[in-house]
Amino acid sequence: MGQRTLLVGLAHPDDEVGAAGTILAQRARGDRVVVVWLTRGEMTEAFGGIAQDRVAAIREEHGRLAGEILGCETRFLDLPDCGVESTPENACRVAELITEVRPDGILTWGDAWARGMRHPDHQATGRIVRDAVTLARIAKVVAPRKPHRGAAPVFTYRGAHSVLPAVAVDVEPYLDRIFALGEFYLKRIGFGERAWIEERLRTAGAPFGLRYAEVFDAWESAPGIVPSLLPAELTNGEHIHPDRRGEITPPV
């Protein structure tokens, strides 16, 4: 089936709790997963009044250790926590990362209206990462790097009011490590209670007849129940100009 690469672009270390099972499912296929956080989460109040640069260092270590729990690669950018802005410059930075990682799919924040998901950093991060997917295809933008023009369908965290097609990942096989990640963060920043995680996964899975699921918006791929996000069945090929279809390689 061939190894795939999933790039997960999020705002803060601990955002990945919402996709822990999906990351684990992708790794179970033998695929590569790279998680990049655009900030270092230095605005958390979990450590009292210590200096922000010290908090940032602690949070970077959290990200590294979380990556070990999930078995994935981790990266950090240095955008300011609670100050992420969707600008061409920031999108170009992520586009450069995309040309390096060369993902087969992208998971990031989507548009949302519920508390927590609507954090301005989350909303801006989603826009930055989604813009970067297109910018990474443009040679004059990413030069001297080689543009990444392979298929990289976008998936986003699903808000309660989303009308986009939904894809549900069955995460029941990965519960122990999902809960382990939650326990990791619970001990360090007071977030990640097992009961909350379990209820969230059950609620997400119920409409699909699954005991536990993580559900995302499928921007360019077929909806439904899947064991992993990749490989994805693309649905937008008919919208690509015939002269440019060679730039898109559908999943095997």
Image: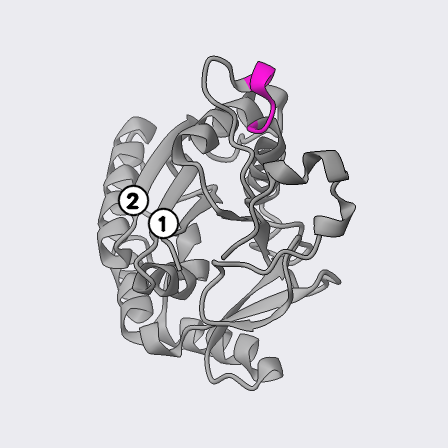
Cα gap from disc 2 to disc 1, whole angstroms: 6 Å
Provide the secondary structure element on which disc 1 rests: strand
Residue 47 visible in image: no
Residue sitting at x 63%, y 58%: 221
Disc 2 to disc 1: CB gap under 8 Å: yes
* Residue at the spot of label 2: 73
Residue 89 is left or right of residue 19, and the answer is: right
Provide the secondary structure element on which disc 2 rests: strand
Residue sitting at x 36%, y 34%: 76
Residue sitting at x 41%, y 54%: 16
Q: Quadrant of residue 42?
A: top left
Question: What amino acid is found at the position of numbered circle 1 in the picture?
Answer: Val
| Label 1: how many Cα within 10 Å (few below 14, some 14–19, many 20+) | many
| Label 2: how many Cα within 10 Å (few below 14, some 14–19, many 20+) | some
From the top left corner, tell me how far across and down residue 161 is, in percent.
Answer: 72, 63
Residue 10 is left or right of residue 176, and the answer is: right
Pick the residue in front: 165 or 59.
Answer: 165
From the top left corner, tell me how far across and down residue 138 is, in percent.
Answer: 61, 23
Pick the residue in front: 192 or 168.
Answer: 168
From the top left corner, tell me how far across and down residue 102 is, in percent.
Answer: 44, 36
The circle on residue 91 is none
Q: Give the magenta-colored segment's residue range.
A: 136-141
Tally the numbered discs. Answer: 2
Query: Considering only order in the chain, which callout, 1 or 2, is on the residue closer to the N terminus?
Result: 1
Does the segment drawn in magenta span residue 101?
no
* Residue at the spot of label 1: 33
Tell me if residue 39 comes above or below residue 107 in the rendering: above
From the top left corner, tell me how far across and down residue 179 is, in percent.
Answer: 31, 70
Position of the N terminus, as image quadrant, is bottom left
Question: What amino acid is found at the position of numbered circle 2 in the picture?
Answer: Glu
